């Protein structure tokens, strides 16, 4: 046999072998999911897998309502909690690209003080350090604001803005307030026009939509008690409702744009500041996503953890791979994350051990 023919045959064997490996991992993932959900008391789950820059599998499992036993489908809407942050970050970076907001200009310079106090929090400007906060600081979680305000107490900075990392939902809500003033429209319509509709995310919203209420997965707390579903103030940091299918469309678009060199997408995924998550140098934060630094390259990620929902997204723009899932119960969804990532992406994710999350199959 000629050397050239032998080489061609070897390459063909490898190409045929790689899809079989991916299919094998998917089979293991599909087989493991029901027992994982049962072991952690997860009623419903929405999941999608991206390989080679394409959505190769998406599914809904379990029930969206424990009382009626209605099955979850790929169109069932789940609460996305903090996974709403990267979507908004992308929109802000687009505004920056268009020259409508500068990432390093103090936010207070864009709005009248009276507007900020009325729409964000009265008494806010009593803290002089608020005047230092920029859009960049919000997006990479160095604003100095707490994660969430204490009811009935004034909100103040915890340290000099820009000096270090500290995760903050309040920072994102502050930036939302400024963006709404700049674009002269509610954040929901701005996001629909800027991100959701252009990316065909037809089942995604930050606002409660009565017309979609029958598609909502009912949410449950840690004890399995139903969390009442009702309209709430739109907040890009925690009121997202979406499907894994929709969110996967966003991820595919961002990863492809990043690989092609689009600056907005690259900024969303690139490392900006060090964090105190895990070991020093292991995890940093970009302008929207956390970034894990691994021997296999950099992986972007974001977790969702709330009293009514949880989930996770992790992926590699260079490899064009990602996993995204949502569950309808508080915090329990993070117990299955480590196993899901291993099965779906063949990656040992260190985050959940760093967070102190007990894996679903760990002994009590």
Image (cartoon, grey):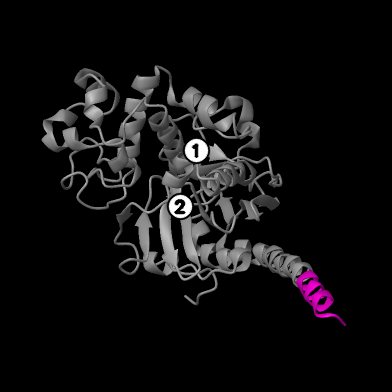
Q: At x 38% / y 45%, what residue is drawn?
A: 287
Residue 10 inside the magenta-drawn segment: yes
Please report whichever mark, 2 or 1, sits nearer to the chain's N-terminal start. 1
Q: Estimate the spatial distance between the alpha carbons at disc 2 and disc 1, rounded to whole Å.
A: 14 Å
Disc 2 target residue: 302
Q: Secondary structure at mark 2?
A: strand
Residue 3, percent across and down? 80, 80
Q: Quadrant of the N terminus?
A: bottom right
* Residue positioned 46% across, 50% down in the render: 304
For the record, the magenta segment spans 1-13
Q: Main secondary structure of the magenta part?
A: helix
Q: Is residue 291 magenta?
A: no
Label 1: which residue?
A: 240
Residues at circles 2 and 1 in contact by the CB criterion of under 8 Å: no
SS state under label 1:
strand
Question: Which residue, as the protein is rendered here, is positioned at the far right?
Answer: 1
Coordinates of residue 134 in the picture (x, y in percent): 26, 36
């Amino acid at each position: 046999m000629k050397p050239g023919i032998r080489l061609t045959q070897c390459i063909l064997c490898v190409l045929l072998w790689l899809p079989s490996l991916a299919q094998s991992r998917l089979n293991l993932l599909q087989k493991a999911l029901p027992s994982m959900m049962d072991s952690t008391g997860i009623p419903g789950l929405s999941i999608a897998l991206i390989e080679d820059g394409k959505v190769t599998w998406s599914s809904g499992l379990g029930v969206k309502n424990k009382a009626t036993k209605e099955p979850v489908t790929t169109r069932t809407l789940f609460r996305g909690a903090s996974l709403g942050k990267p979507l908004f970050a992308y929109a802000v970076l687009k505004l920056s690209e268009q020259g409508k907001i500068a990432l390093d200009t103090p936010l207070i310079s864009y709005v009248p003080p009276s507007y900020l106090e009325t729409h964000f929090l009265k008494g806010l400007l009593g803290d002089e350090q608020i005047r230092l906060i920029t859009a960049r600081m919000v997006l990479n979680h160095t604003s100095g604001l707490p994660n969430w305000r204490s009811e009935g107490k004034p909100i103040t900075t915890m340290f000099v803005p820009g000096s270090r990392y500290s995760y903050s939902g309040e920072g994102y809500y502050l930036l939302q307030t400024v963006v709404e003033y700049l674009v002269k429209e509610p954040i929901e319509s701005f996001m629909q026009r800027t991100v959701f509709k252009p990316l065909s995310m037809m089942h995604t919203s930050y606002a409660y939509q009565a017309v979609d209420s029958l598609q909502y997965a009912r949410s449950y707390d840690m004890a399995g008690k139903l969390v009442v579903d009702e309209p709430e103030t739109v907040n890009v940091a925690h009121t997202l409702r979406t499907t894994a299918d929709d969110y996967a469309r966003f991820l595919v678009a961002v990863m492809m744009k990043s690989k092609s060199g689009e600056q907005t997408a690259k900024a969303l995924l690139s490392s900006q500041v060090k964090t105190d998550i895990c070991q020093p140098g292991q995890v940093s934060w970009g302008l929207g996503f956390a970034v894990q630094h691994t021997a296999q390259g950099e992986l972007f990620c974001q977790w969702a953890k709330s009293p009514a929902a949880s989930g996770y997204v992790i992926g590699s723009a260079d490899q064009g791979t990602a996993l995204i899932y949502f569950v309808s119960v508080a915090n329990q969804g993070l117990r299955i994350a480590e196993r899901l990532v291993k099965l779906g992406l063949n990656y040992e994710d260190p985050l959940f051990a760093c967070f102190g999350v007990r894996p679903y199959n760990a002994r009590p």
